[in-house]
Every structure is written in C-alpha cells, then in structure tokens.
C-alpha cells in the first residue's frame, strides 16, 4: 500500500536495469497506485523511485511484484 504521507509533493521515476531514468510522473490529481501501474506497463522499467518534487531527494523504491 502506498503511504498516505507521501501522496503529494512526490515524483515517481522509472528506471531500467542499468539504473537509467526512463520516465517520470509528478503526483498530482492521479492516484499513486494508478501512476505506478502505468509506469510498470513499460516492460523496460525495472524499478521505480518516489522522490521529493522540490529537491529530488530519494524517499523509497517500488519494485515489481
């Protein structure tokens, strides 16, 4: 379950197996779970990271189930 305290002011970034960022979505009106599912539709996305929108600070990783 996505933590309630991180539903705003976050960007979710998708990375490939080489740790290159391949996509990113700023959380706004969309539910985090929807954004996560959309990013994982890309088969190249190996993992996701939630980060601060303002400073880019790492918050936590999201891995495929």
Image (cartoon, grey):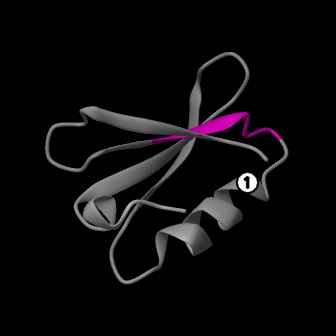
Residue placed furthest toward the left: 54
Residue placed furthest toward the top: 18
Residue toward you, 43 or 33? 33
Q: Is residue 54 left or right of residue 53?
A: left
- Where residue 59 sits, quadrant-wise, is top left
Secondary structure at numbered mark 1: helix
Residue 25 on image: x %, y %: 45, 59
Residue 33 on image: x %, y %: 57, 69
Q: Is residue 33 left or right of residue 9?
A: right
Crowding at mark 1 (Cα within 10 Å: few <14, some 14-19, many 20+): some
- Answer whether residue 27 is magenta in the image: no
Residue 27 on image: x %, y %: 37, 67
Residue 53 on image: x %, y %: 23, 50
Residue at 69% from the left image edge and 29% from the top image edge: 16
Say if 14 sits above or below 26 in the image.
Answer: above
Residue assigned mark 1:
40
Magenta stretch, residue numbers:
44-49
Q: Is residue 29 left or right of residue 56?
A: right
Say if 33 sits above or below 39 in the image.
Answer: below
- Where residue 41 sits, quadrant-wise, is bottom right
Residue placed furthest toward the bottom: 29
User: Number of numbered discs present?
Assistant: 1
Say if 36 sits above or below 50 in the image.
Answer: below
Residue at 55% from the left image edge and 62% from the top image edge: 1
Residue at 73% from the left image edge and 21% from the top image edge: 17
Residue at 85% from the left image edge and 45% from the top image edge: 43
């Amino acid at each position: 379950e996505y933590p309630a305290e991180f539903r705003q002011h976050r960007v979710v970034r998708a990375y490939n197996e080489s740790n290159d960022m391949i996509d990113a979505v700023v959380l706004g009106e969309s539910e985090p779970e929807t954004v996560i599912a959309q990013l994982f539709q890309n088969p190249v996305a190996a993992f996701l990271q939630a980060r601060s929108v303002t400073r880019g600070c790492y918050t936590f990783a999201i891995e495929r189930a």
